[in-house]
């Protein structure tokens, strides 16, 4: 049975457990049920704080978020992005992978849109072997 963990981060960056539940399986229906329970719990709190959810790009969970918590911003977890980059590009880029990974992380953490776009375009030019993977994801 899959375990769904929901954690939060406070104003000083400390992570804490909000809720957990065992699911029969990882379907949109089960994720919708879990998100409804989370929403009920949050509605009973004095601080309404569900603003962002980070996930591993599970399509069923993403569908449940869009259905049950449409106001919540959905983002992909950086750790999962990094793991997918390693899994899918390490062998493809071979000796260039370490440099690519460093450059990709630099791009990923750009907060200025113009600077991001400039570095993203440079990344596409510098590592054409990675283009198909990073542009189709």
Image (cartoon, rainbow, N blue to C red):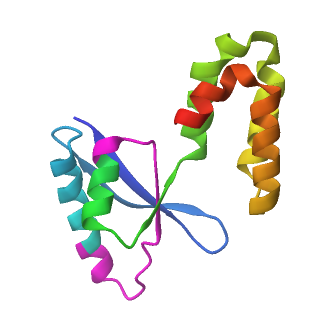
Tell me which corner region of the image, top left, top right, bottom left or bottom right, holds residue 111: bottom right
> Which corner quadrant holds the N terminus?
top left
Count of all numbered marks drawn on residues in the image: 0
Q: Nearer the viewer, residue 79 or 68?
A: 68
Q: Nearer the viewer, residue 135 or 57?
A: 135
Residue visible at 60% across and 45% down? 78
Q: Residue furthest bottom?
A: 46
Residue visible at 18% across and 49% down? 30
Residue visible at 84% across and 26% down? 99
Residue 57: in magenta span? yes
Residue 80 lies left or right of residue 33; in this view the side is: right
Q: Is residue 15 above or below residue 121?
A: below
Residue 60 lies left or right of residue 123; in this view the side is: left
Residue 66: in magenta span? no
Q: Is residue 116 above or below residue 127?
A: below
Q: Which residues are magenta?
A: 40-60
Residue visible at 63% across and 24% down? 86
Residue 110 position within the rendered picture, expressed as x and y whole percent measured from the top left: 77, 55
Residue 135 position within the rendered picture, expressed as x and y whole percent measured from the top left: 59, 36
Residue 134 position within the rendered picture, expressed as x and y whole percent measured from the top left: 61, 33
Tell me which corner region of the image, top left, top right, bottom left or bottom right, holds residue 102: top right
Q: Nearer the viewer, residue 92 or 4?
A: 92
Tell me which corner region of the image, top left, top right, bottom left or bottom right, holds residue 79: top right
């Amino acid at each position: 049975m899959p375990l769904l963990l929901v954690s939060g981060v406070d104003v000083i960056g400390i992570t804490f457990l909000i809720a957990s539940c065992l699911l029969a399986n990882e379907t949109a229906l089960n994720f919708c049920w879990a998100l409804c329970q989370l929403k009920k719990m949050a509605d009973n709190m004095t601080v309404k704080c569900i603003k962002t959810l980070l996930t591993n790009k599970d399509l069923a969970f993403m569908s449940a978020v869009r259905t049950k918590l449409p106001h919540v911003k959905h983002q992909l977890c950086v750790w999962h992005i990094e793991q997918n980059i390693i899994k899918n590009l390490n062998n493809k880029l071979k000796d260039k992978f370490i440099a690519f990974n460093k450059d990709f992380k630099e791009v990923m953490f750009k907060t200025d849109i113009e600077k991001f776009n400039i570095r993203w375009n440079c990344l596409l030019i510098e590592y054409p072997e990675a283009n198909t993977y990073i542009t189709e994801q």
